[in-house]
């Protein structure tokens, strides 16, 4: 499918950039347009691939912001986004909406600009356009502290409500031991881009051959139109194509060419591996309402029988008949890759834990504020309250 991507805030812009990079590296054409929106001028210089004229600074005239960001305050982030909706609209005027199957709004939920702004803009897009609006929301890692959890838990409610589906990515599950924060993010952003692009990039029908079992945009939209949260599974296998083409004739001569059954087993096995591997956000697969399998690779590897078996297997795993499976032929791909969308998952322990921490943080913040008010009053008032203030 083709999407217009809006990266909101620092994480949103970097992830949108990573999607552009992965798409260019693999010859896909998912993004019809990408817009980075931020209230901090400095963060708008971070992306490498997003064109300069597709970077929008909001809140420039806001007395508390002035191009310096909203300081991890999502209420301010939402206010700034609301105030500058006209500017965002103008920037989106150039989006070729007739050629776009959906909007994708990307944000990290633990900060301010993306956390507060992404739900505002998503709601607005839904009012303005007939195309579905999907969110891609990053949950903060536990060690970012209570404030980030509180921001994320509050944004999660608004963002889910404002979108047709919110795909979650959990920084906690993807944090790598021993990596610096930014090094870690570069790695996780690439992994996230790989998953989202393999999934949504199917059905773009660019220079790839259209197969009978090709996934199309309406299948993806149908699976995502659940109003809940989603997670993505992924696995890939390297194909040594050069060696293979060299050896193929030899194998064939000896009667050892890969059979239909080999191809089917490879596809089915990869789908199973994906679903049992780390999801973008850990969730109980059985709680998914709908799911969709995309198998991407060279046409000869895309076994229809393998897809059928994988679909049947996923039906039993999710205890649902709402499972679609299709392929995405890529003539020159050197990998066979599988992305599985698990839509409207309801058993997501990470979200429960986030909400618990958020409630705890909110209580602590309120208690600290009250205690501080008392301390300040005590400090500035004389001991027996004998003085009148001026
Ligand atoms: P904003 O600019 O105010 O929206 O805030 P940021 O995007 O800087 O941070 C919001 C949250 O996003 C943080 O709490 C982190 O959890 C997360 N985050 C920041 N940068 C990245 C990134 O490059 N990748 C990922 N996966 N998460 C990030």
Image (cartoon, rainbow, N blue to C red):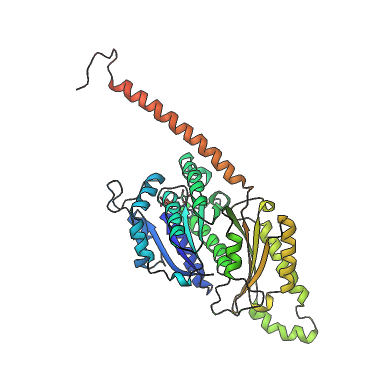
Q: Residue at x 63, y 50 (%)?
A: 283
Q: Residue furthest left?
A: 390
**Which quadrant does the N terminus fall into?**
bottom right
| Residue 366: quadrant of the picture | top left
The answer to whether residue 259 is above or below residue 14 is below
Q: Position of residue 198 (x, y in %)?
A: 57, 67
Front residue of 78 and 67: 78
Front residue of 339 and 323: 323
Regarding residue 266, the answer to whether it shows in the image is no
Q: In this view, does 208 lie to the left or right of 321?
A: left
**Which quadrant does the C terminus fall into?**
top left
Q: Position of residue 341 (x, y in %)?
A: 62, 60
The answer to whether residue 27 is above or below residue 229 is below
Q: Which residue is drawn at 80% across and 84% down?
A: 254
| Residue 318: quadrant of the picture | bottom right
Q: In this view, does 60 lie to the left or right of 322?
A: left
Q: Residue furthest right?
A: 255
Q: Is residue 25 left or right of residue 334?
A: left
Regarding residue 264, the answer to whether it shows in the image is yes
Q: Which residue is drawn at 64% across and 80% down?
A: 242
The answer to whether residue 377 is above or below residue 362 is above
Q: Position of residue 375 (x, y in %)?
A: 35, 24
Q: Position of residue 116 (x, y in %)?
A: 42, 49
């Amino acid at each position: 499918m083709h999407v217009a991507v809006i990266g909101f805030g620092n994480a949103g812009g970097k992830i949108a950039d990573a999607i552009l990079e992965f798409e260019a590296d693999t010859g896909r054409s998912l993004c019809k347009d990408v817009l980075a929106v931020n209230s901090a001028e400095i963060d708008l210089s971070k992306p490498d691939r997003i064109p300069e004229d597709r970077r929008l600074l909001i809140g420039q005239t806001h007395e508390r912001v002035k191009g310096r960001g909203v300081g991890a305050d999502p209420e301010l982030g939402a206010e700034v986004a609301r105030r500058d909706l006209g500017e965002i609209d103008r920037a989106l005027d150039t989006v070729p909406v007739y050629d776009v199957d959906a909007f994708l709004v990307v944000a990290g939920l633990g900060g301010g600009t993306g956390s507060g702004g992404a739900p505002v803009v998503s709601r607005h897009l839904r009012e303005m356009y007939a195309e579905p609006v999907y969110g891609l929301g990053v949950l903060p890692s536990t060690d970012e502290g209570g404030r980030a959890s509180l921001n994320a838990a509050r944004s999660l409610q608004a963002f889910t409500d404002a979108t047709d589906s919110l795909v979650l990515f959990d920084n906690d599950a993807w944090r790598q031991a021993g990596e610096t924060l930014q090094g870690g993010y570069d790695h996780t952003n690439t992994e996230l881009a790989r998953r989202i692009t393999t999934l949504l990039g199917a059905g773009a029908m660019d220079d790839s051959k259209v197969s009978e079992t090709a996934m199309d945009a309406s299948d993806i939209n149908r699976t995502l139109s659940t109003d809940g949260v989603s997670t993505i599974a992924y696995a890939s296998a390297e194909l040594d194509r050069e060696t293979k083409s060299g050896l193929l004739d030899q194998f064939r001569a000896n009667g050892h060419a890969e059979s239909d059954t080999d191809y089917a087993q490879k596809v089915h096995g990869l789908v199973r591996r994906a679903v049992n591997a780390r999801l973008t956000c850990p969730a109980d697969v059985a709680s998914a309402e709908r799911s969709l399998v995309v198998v991407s690779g060279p046409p000869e590897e895309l076994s229809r029988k393998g897809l059928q078996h994988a679909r049947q297997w996923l039906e039993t795993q999710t205890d649902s008949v709402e499972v679609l499976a299709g392929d995405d032929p890529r003539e020159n791909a050197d990998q066979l890759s599988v992305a599985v969308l698990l839509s409207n998952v309801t058993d997501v322990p990470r979200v429960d834990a986030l909400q618990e921490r958020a409630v705890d943080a909110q209580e602590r913040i309120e208690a600290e504020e009250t205690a501080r008010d008392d301390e300040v009053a005590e400090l500035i008032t004389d001991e027996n309250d004998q003085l009148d203030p001026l």
